[in-house]
């Protein structure tokens, strides 16, 4: 994933810090920056002669190199987010590409808004910090320790549609 992906401005009325944290969580969950369109260089291992860069929205391929040797772009074909060529790829290929959505898809925006709300609710009721009675002691819950325990399942189901395998 892009080390420092471009910031996505929060919708009106949404706390900017909470929005940025939720966008970052969604990006980490999905293993790519999603939006906006940006350029990135990644190393991708060829599988069955195909390259599948970590994106669902491949805009263009700028360069390819195998073991430091450039592969002419005229020798490849791009189908969706897959790159193929008649002479099969083998090994790890360096791909420089432009990818991402111009703006966040509506379903991702809704999921990120829901994540902001879930994080705020978890911060207000962080769970049990400590409770003891006789020989029994109850420690901090994960939510109390971290302020938020993760991405709720209903939000994860939306993000799953945008998940890609991580690059090695």
Image: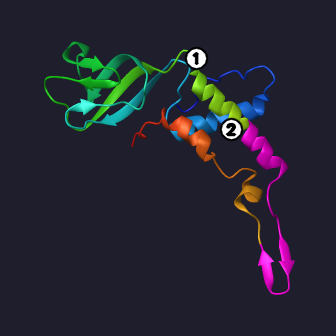
**Which numbered disc flags the more N-terminal residue, 2 or 1?**
1
- The circle on residue 31 is none
Q: Quadrant of the C terminus?
A: top left
Residue located farthest toward the top when viewing the structure as drawn: 74
Residue that mark 1 sits on: 103
Give, as a single range, the part of the protein colored magenta. 117-138
* Residue extending farthest bottom: 135
Q: Of helix, strand and loop, which one carries label 2?
A: helix
- Residue at 72% across, 23% down: 10
User: Where's residue 142, x and y in %?
Assistant: 70, 60
Residue 158 belongs to the span the image colors magenta: no
Q: Position of residue 63 (x, y in %)?
A: 33, 19
Residue under pointer 2: 115
At 55% across and 35% down in the image, what residue appears?
Answer: 158
Name of the residue lying farthest toward the front:
154
Image quarter of residue 120: top right
Distance from the alpha carbon under mark 2 to that under mark 1: 18 Å
Tell me if residue 22 comes above or below residue 73 in the rendering. below
């Amino acid at each position: 994933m892009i080390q420092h992906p471009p910031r996505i401005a929060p919708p009106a009325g949404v706390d900017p810090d909470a929005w940025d944290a939720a966008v970052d969580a969604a990006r980490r969950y999905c293993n790519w920056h999603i939006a906006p369109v940006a350029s990135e260089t990644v190393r991708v291992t060829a599988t069955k002669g195909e390259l599948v860069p970590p994106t669902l929205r491949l805009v263009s391929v700028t360069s390819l190199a195998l073991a430091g040797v450039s592969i002419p772009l005229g020798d490849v074909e791009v189908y969706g987010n897959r790159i193929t060529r008649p002479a099969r790829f083998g090994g790890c290929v360096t791909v420089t590409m432009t990818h991402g959505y111009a703006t966040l898809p509506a379903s991702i925006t809704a999921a990120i808004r829901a994540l902001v709300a879930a994080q705020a609710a978890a911060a207000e009721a962080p769970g049990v910090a400590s409770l003891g009675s006789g020989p029994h002691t109850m420690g901090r819950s994960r939510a109390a320790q971290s302020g938020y325990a993760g991405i709720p399942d209903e939000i994860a189901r939306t993000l799953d549609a945008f998940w890609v395998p991580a690059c090695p």
